[in-house]
Image: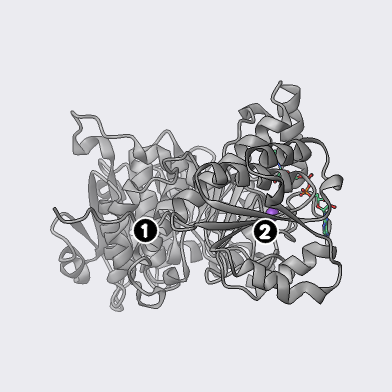
Amino acid sequence: MKILTAAEMKQADDSSVAAGIPIADLMEAAGEAVAAFCLRQYPQAAHVMVLCGKGNNGGDGFVAARLLAGEGVGVRVLLAGRQDDVKGDAAEALALLKEATSDEIVEEFVDETDEHLEAIIELLSEADLILDAVVGTGFKPPLRGPAAILRDALAKSAIPVVAVDLPSGWDADSQQQTAEGAFRADAVVTFTAPKHAHIFGHLTAATFGPVVVADIGSPEDTIQSSQNLNWAGTAKSVTERPRDINSNKGKFGHILIIGGSFGTAGAPSMASLAALRAGAGLVTAAVPREIVNLVGSVTPELMVRPLLHDAEGTATAANLTNLETLTKGIKVIAIGPGLSTQGEASEFARGVVAQTKLPIVIDADALNAFDADHVHLLDGANRTMVLTPHPGEMARLLGKTVKEVEADRINLARKFATEHHLTLVLKGWRTLIAHPDGSIAVNTTGNPGLAKGGSGDILTGIVAALLGQYPDNVAEAVEAAVYLHGLAADLVARHLDEKSILATDVISHLTQAFRYRNVDADGLTWFCGIQPKPKEPADA
Ligand SMILES: NC(=O)C1=CN([C@@H]2O[C@H](COP(=O)(O)OP(=O)(O)OC[C@H]3O[C@@H](n4cnc5c(N)ncnc54)[C@H](O)[C@@H]3O)[C@@H](O)[C@H]2O)[C@H](O)CC1
Ligand SMILES: [K+]
């Protein structure tokens, strides 16, 4: 799924019209998606207040109001402006609403002062759900007139708000959008494709719920993202295909995890366990001899091979002479978790990358082996190469500061991936997956519970496992890995506080993540936030 700017969205609308789909049809589908979302997520809502503007965003609100009323929901519409000023398709939708209900359903609110603020707050309090269809992509900041007063009234109420297309007052193209100055929202139903603000909006989970995307009938070829920005969640479908009935472990890849040192046996252990839970056929961990038994005891399904190490427990470059034996039958190598940067570890890591042509995931201490002096050795032109740096590791790869990396994530990731012909996973809030062809996928799963040691190690294991299963589908495999990793953490957060989440909890929820579907029964794509846990069936 592509991520669009407001102008690209407008272009999609215009192209849809040119392809014979009238705006009225798109508006009807938009209103229908909003009504379906409300009925499904707020089944208890008996009184819905629909706040509408005079433009087409308001038009979507009129359609939703009509359809909700048709389902027996008590609906009132508060129009920020005069009915006579509503034009075109929105006016048609307004007429249909009144025809289906009554002329009295719509109340005009034209006040430009906050004289009636208290009265509006009182009016809103009579509803148990509010729809915000005041302004959408046609918004030009700052919010003014009656719209601004509605926003202030909403800020003083605690009733759930579903935003139509985007919270009124948001700039769709902003990557820095905050809740400030805009309408409060608990959920957003947007259309055709998410816009930049939906994905990069700086809103906290406490003030901001799910964003769902509804397909409202625009043909696929009308939807174009000039910035080549996509959503990582689409790739999950790759992992949803059932396995062939005649499957055997040989089909799903033998993964070799290279890492560990004295004191960091946990890192390769977690990467290995995650790879097993992510569907790898076989997993072998190659770790310093002294910790072989420790790592091997993590789970009996895991195989372990010893690495030569120095007195401090760091793998030595002498292991390179044995590399051919070590990698026999291996489909994917993941190197780095717990490897250490001491002794000859970096030399060993660079040697593994140089001597094998196998698909490779390079993480953690192995990434640090490619500092500014060695970064030119990273070349994925004739092999599959995936790097999974956090901003600190990315800064080292680039010889820049973390601040410089954070300030320009998309461009830096894209440049690095294309120049080195590899897939770069730049971790952090909204992890980016930059592909060698210059396209970028943005991930929307994950929560602050992942800000804990071990999270990166398990991501490495998942990436390696999916590469082993989908070797011809590298882009999707990596995107799906990142998405599933965050999704598993989001599923843990349904019952554990974010602060208490351990990386091993995330591993144990991978299985639920594989089974979770991000498209709901109404066809809405849950783009940010996950569907609430289904109710347990009542005991018979
Ligand atoms: N995506 C689609 O395929 C479809 C989207 N639809 C919806 O249409 C809106 C965009 O509609 P548009 O008429 O262009 O603009 P808006 O309704 O968002 O805004 C116009 C409206 O707002 C007033 N306004 C503008 N700026 C301000 C401000 N700073 N303060 C107060 N009021 C403001 C302006 O005066 C107008 O009255 C899109 O978001 C979708 O929701 C369609 O349904 C078709 C399909
Ligand atoms: K809106």
Looking at the image, residue 261 sits to the left or right of residue 98; the answer is left
- Where in the figure is residue 388, as x and y percent of width and height? 48, 57
**Towards the viewer: 103 or 497:** 103
Image point (56%, 68%), residue name: 159
x and y, in percent, of residue 334 in the image: 37, 54
Question: Which mark, by number, is residue 202?
Answer: none
* Residues at marks 2 and 1 touching, judged by CB atoms closer than 8 Å: no
User: Mark 1: which amino acid?
Assistant: Ala
In the image shown, does 275 or 497 lie closer to the viewer?
Answer: 497
Which residue is disc 1 drawn over? 488
User: Which sits in the foreground, 177 or 271?
Assistant: 177
- Taking the spot 71% from the left edge, 34% from the top edge, the residue there is 12
Labels 2 and 1: the sequence-earlier one: 2
Counting from the top left corner in percent of width and height, residue 90 is at 76, 40
In this rendering, the answer to whether 324 lies above or below 296 is above
Mark 2, ligand 2, within 8 Å: the answer is yes
Q: What's under tag 2, amino acid-wise?
A: Pro
